[in-house]
Image (spheres, rainbow, N blue to C red):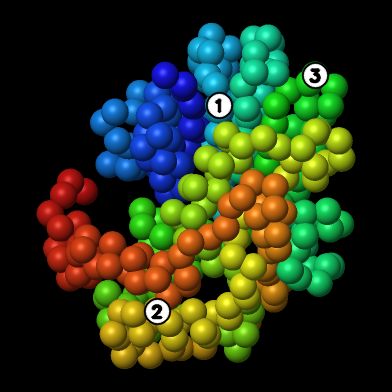
Amino acid sequence: MPSVLVTGGAGFIGSHVADVFLSRDYAVHVVDNFSSGRRENVDPRVRLHELDIRSPEAARLVAETPFDIIVHLAAQIDVRKSVADPVMDATINICGTLNLIEALRQSGRGQRTRFVFSSTGGALYGDFVDPPNVENYPKDPESPYGIAKLSAEYYLAYYARVHGMDTVAVRFANVYGPRQDPHGEAGVVAIFCGRILDGRPLSVFGDGGQTRDYVFVGDVAEATVTAATHSVPRPERLDARAFNVGTGVETSVTELARLLRRVARSEVTVEHLPKRPGEQQRSVVSIAKAGSLLGWRPRYSLEEGLSRTFNWFAERHTPNRERAAAGSGGQR
């Protein structure tokens, strides 16, 4: 039975990736430190390792276990946190990645184990190119998060060219879907679902004309597994083994709010807040390369994905007043 390690496999995207591998009869191992992942996301058939990707124990697991595939999804994903603490962001997104891939190199299995790295299709390219972003576009990220993801990709290209390791990068657009956290720093779809279910207005910054490429998590999981198992080009330039994963469709925040209210049959209002300084105005990726070289294309329309996502949140929703009552009876 082939085996795979999914780092961050208790998280939003990672748990969906683990589920796809399970459906294909892989022995699935998950590494997660539960800084944001949830135990209920982990299938009982998965072998769980509660570890930090920066730790010697995580490196030892990679070095001593003959995985066929490693899918590296564990990361610090909040752009604003990366701006507030670039050192913290770099220790996770650069040093944590290096900890694992260097352990794989030292194991001598780097040429036999496919190492798939989750990168970013939005923050990587910056605002200096005209979307849709193609993989070989110039890259000029404007946040420590984007800089760290690009740095990790450069390391992977180095390991592939110099050490002959089998590395691939998947550059995600704006992923949404079941299991995403609607509280705190989350994707706008999850936040909007939570607000609709609580009967609260949807907050839109600026005029709502800023666009993103919203891709359903089920499509992202399939794309990631395809990149992990499909033949890929030779590791020549940086972008040779990088694949954008999105829909290729731009959707404004205003249109997103309209569609989500429609699938939810909700009449909550939309409130406009001041424009956030430095916010990227347009972001959409080209997915032609993934289509031609991997044979992957998204299956879910935005409306279908939003419907599935909202229904998932609705089935698990606890009204605000019940959450407040539950929180008032604990220890102080």
Name above or below for residue 58 compared with residue 91.
above
**Residues at marks 2 and 3, CA–CA distance in whole angstroms:** 47 Å
Q: Answer whether residue 290 is visible to the viewer in this image.
A: yes
Q: Could you say which quadrant of the image residue 87 lies in?
A: top right
Seen at 68% across and 69% down, the residue is: 283
Q: Amino acid at mark 1?
A: Ile
Residue to which mark 2 is pinned: 260
Residue 15: give x, y in percent of width and height: 40, 42
Disc 2 on helix, strand or loop? helix
Q: Which residue position is annotated with label 1?
A: 69
Mark sitting earlier along the chain (1/3): 1
Q: Is residue 322 above or below residue 195?
A: above
User: How many numbered marks are there?
Assistant: 3
Disc 2 packing (10 Å; few <14; some 14–19; many ≥20): many
Q: Nearer the viewer, residue 211 or 225?
A: 225
Label 3: element kind: helix
| Amino acid at circle 2 | Leu
Report which quarter residue 177 is drawn in: bottom left
